[in-house]
Image (tube, rainbow, N blue to C red):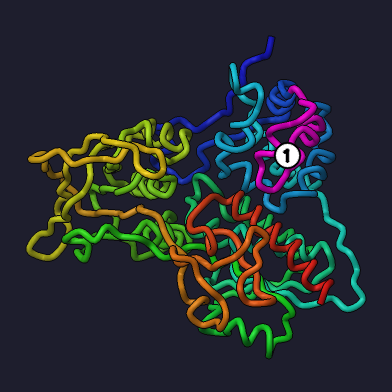
Amino acid sequence: MISPRTKVREQDPRQRACNFDEVSLGFNLEEARTEASRCLHCKNPRCVAACPVGLDIPGFISKVKEGDIVAAAEVIARDSSLPAVCGRVCPQETQCEGSCVLGIKGESVAIGNLERFVADYSRENGCAPGAECQKLDNPCKVAVVGSGPAGLACAADLAKWGYDVTVFEALHALGGVLAYGIPEFRLPKDKVLAPEIENLRKLGVKFECDCIIGRTLSIDQLLDREGFKAVFVGSGAGLPKFMGIPGENLNGVFSANEFLTRNNLMKAWRSDYATPIFVGRKVCVVGGGNVAMDAARTALRLGAEVHIVYRRSEAELPARREEVHHAKEEGIVFDTLCNPCEILGDERSWVRALRCLRMELGEPDQSGRRSPVAIPGSEFEIEADTVIMALGTSPNPLIVNTTAGLEATRRGGISADSDGRTTRPGVFAGGDAVTGAATVILAMGAGRKAAAAIRDYLQDK
């Protein structure tokens, strides 16, 4: 008989809806060892194959089961430079945990929570593993554009191999989408993100903030004037999408990017910061992905009544099940099978309501999901003074437009092969800058593949 999955302790929904403290409290040592004992240690572990960075999951779990957390952290460190981050924000249910054999007839092993426990335990007890770096006689300089998950993963591997790595970040804070896009209650910045970035500094990685590649410096200048022998572009996908409906230019309409960035980087969630951010009394968040959940739950904590408006059914929400569950527990209203058709304003050009159409599901579209079809005559209004558009993002074309020989895809991403090689020799790319908005762990996997390709390129050269 397989024991049931160990439950993770969480803040009470009524309390956490009013604060930005972390929702999940994580495992303690006893809980972690109990959960680790559920692992079957399969001969052909499907969980490893489903992990974009190839983490030795059975290896670190066996060490947790033995109570040797230092050894578990060393196993993880071989493949992941951001374990405390990944343990919190990766969609394990569709990757490692989704492939766990136990999940076929029951509940999968809580791989994400175990990874988080190991990372937190080793950090809090001062026993985080230090990576050994190779010593090259004449290390080549490599530039990494963007300090998000793809850039950090690429920089970490290259630094371990002995290369002289500098990361260029456009904003004033490091971490990319980890810093500006994910709320504090899901990923604490000072407690969790900052120490993992500091580990890269210990590897020898250098960081330059407030440097926009394509404006402050070009790719050509990095390669020709600054002496870098290769460049990795992991600049993410920060260009927000809108619906193109009437009223989107009214006061009180935001992209989720702007709303979350103001809250995260400018610390609008803290009472001792005078950050200019308008929340309003009633907020409508348009979209159903993880970013929509983050924006909605942030607005709720800032004091608003929040509705999520999504054009398909609840069963088709693309957000993680955990995030949807938490949002409902906290009191967010889900208006599914509804599609906005106009944002209505008052005499001062401020939002006063969101006009929507009721929808029904028709035939499946190219993605396999049933396409929503408007029901004639079903228009209705939702009172609101703020509308947040969380409809996805696309890569900013700045680097493509300022770099000769660098081609883009039809969707605006940088054209690159599966190992990150672009159409410009010496320039590599990966993560959201290539694929469009995706997950943290997929970006990290792309960064690691590109790092290996850069090493091969430099050795051949």
* Quarter placement of the N terminus: top right
Horizontal placement of 415 versus 195: left or right? Answer: left
Instruction: Specify the segment rendered in magenta.
Output: 40-64
* Quarter placement of the C terminus: bottom right
Q: Quadrant of residue 216?
A: bottom right
Residue at 80% of width from left, 30% of height from top? 62
Q: Position of residue 140 (x, y in %)?
A: 80, 77
Residue at 68% of width from left, 60% of height from top? 419
Residue at 84% of width from left, 34% of height from top? 68
| Residue 384 seen in this snapshot | yes
Q: Position of residue 182 (x, y in %)?
A: 49, 52
Q: Position of residue 99 (x, y in %)?
A: 63, 31
Residue at numbered disc 1: 118
Horizontal placement of 314 versus 425: left or right? Answer: left
Residue at 62% of width from left, 70% of height from top? 422
| Residue 211 seen in this snapshot | no
Q: Is residue 411 magenta?
A: no
Q: Is residue 386 above or below residue 145?
A: above
